Image: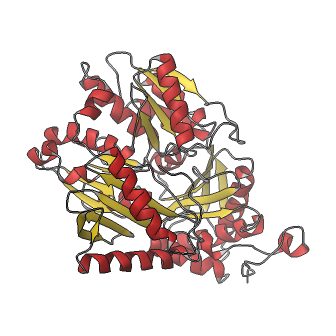
Amino acid sequence: MPLKPRADLAPMTPAYETTPLVKPTGFREYDARWLYGPELNLVGVQALGLGLGTYFAERGERRVVVGHDFRSYSLAIKQALVLGMVSAGCEVLDIGLAVTPMAYFAQFDLSAPCVAMVTASHNENGWTGVKMGAAPPLTFGPDEIGRLKEIVLAGEGLARAGGSVTAIEGVAERYIADAAARCRLSRPIRVVCACGNGTAGAFAPEALRRMGAEVIEVDCALDWTFPKYNPNPEDHAMLSAMARAVREHRAELAFGFDGDGDRCGVVDDTGEEIFADKIGLILARDLAPRHPGAKFVVDVKSTGLFTTDPVLKAAGASTVYWKTGHSYIKRKTAEIGALAGFEKSGHLFFNPPFGRGYDDGLVAAAAILTMLDRHPGEKLSDLKKSLPVAYTSLTMSPHCADERKYEVVQRIVADYEAALAGGESILGRKISSVNTVNGARVSLEDGSWVLVRASSNKPELVVVVESVRSEDDMRALFREEAKPRLAREPEVGAYNQEI
């Protein structure tokens, strides 16, 4: 019987070297993330692998793709995870250093139903985690994570004979070729490729060149210390570096890829960032007239323009607002047969014929370049200017402990629902609705809105606001409404960034 993991082990003790340390809060809504060391040790990773292999066996599966991102400790964590899965009888196919969408691609390429990608994504150094799936192109949701958590924390992982591990060559080359084949530019487009010294730097520049782009590399050399900024295209530091490079090199746009390459941020030819929900709207406007009646899925952090845009209305397109999170949007996009799904954080999903349904920063870049190639007389800034006006904030995240964040959000939801029932106004506008599918998205009578939800993968809340009036009004919605309301909650701490 394997040892049950504990959550109270201290480093530099004999028990830490022999007993699994697995903090329960690391099992998130749709993947798993821990601080390596204080919340998870290597013996705990091995227990996680044994539990994961046991869960795959419950589903009648054993063939699984594994890969790891570029962190100083990711290879060691992957090896411990593989040891656990092999003990559970899994046939492990190790593709080596990879971005997350390369592991998803390998499920199709190698006919493997399961995936376990070791990555901390865009999280700061010190974090690690695993993105998992057992039914391509989908990844785990709460039900699968919940069952895995039960198995691991109860020490119910079962050892089985027949496990193996094979190092697979050539997946990276086939992945790059597959991504590049999705775009064949008829004219050279100068593109900044920013990777924040993360894993995507090993693959993205070459793929963009094969698409026909002239590539300006920015922070593409692998460096797991992330010396300039964290590889997160939602953060101001990375966006600023992209904007400077666009202006310096007179590029038509910049792509910024996150730490594991499944997200893509965009800066236009003027050096202005375009958040992924607006990029999604631009793409949807381009696709909808050629696919009448198309369906799109967006997360609750996304602009409200999807419901009011005249181009989408004329094409008979419809949009569903769904829970934030790559796994949720991926599942909903597949469930309703949507043409594409867009998440404000930069996860973009394309169903066939444009993609395989999973989030891939390079496939998103190929879609954007193909769109620009179809509009040779227009720059990306021109396409942005053609959108109806809406002023959307950065994604802002105040600290809130994992153990408390959902309780806090429940109180905020109840507060806003009471305000709706009482006919209250926010900055002179009546509340028209409160969407509670994922926290509280509070819509005002003029189309502006405020969102408060719990982060799915970090000890934080998430705050986004949008105004249809002005940038000043957008800032006021945060400074005079969202921030003061959250300040009433003692568990809410400092913000990672503020407008």
Percent coordinates x, y for residue 428 in the rendering:
25, 63
Residue 331 in sight in this render: no
Q: How is the image coloured?
A: secondary structure
The answer to whether residue 472 shows anywhere in this view is yes
Q: Position of residue 264 (x, y in %)?
A: 45, 41
Quarter of the image for residue 156 reads bottom right
**Residue 219: x percent and y percent?**
61, 30
Examine the rendered structure and indicate whether residue 63 appears above or below residue 400.
above
- Residue 407 or residue 103, whichever sits in front: 407
- The total number of labels drawn is 0
At x 32%, y 43%, the residue is 278
Judge whether 438 appears above or below 245 on screen: below
Taking 431 as reference, is 497 above or below it? above
Of 233 and 13, nearer the camera is: 233
Q: Residue at x 57, y 49 (%)?
A: 122
Q: Nearer the viewer, residue 78 or 439?
A: 439
Residue 225 percent across, percent down from the top left? 72, 42
Q: Quadrant of residue 337?
A: bottom left
Q: Residue at x 44, y 20 (%)?
A: 251
Query: At 75% across and 54% down in the image, what residue appears?
Result: 76
Q: Quadrant of the N terminus?
A: bottom right
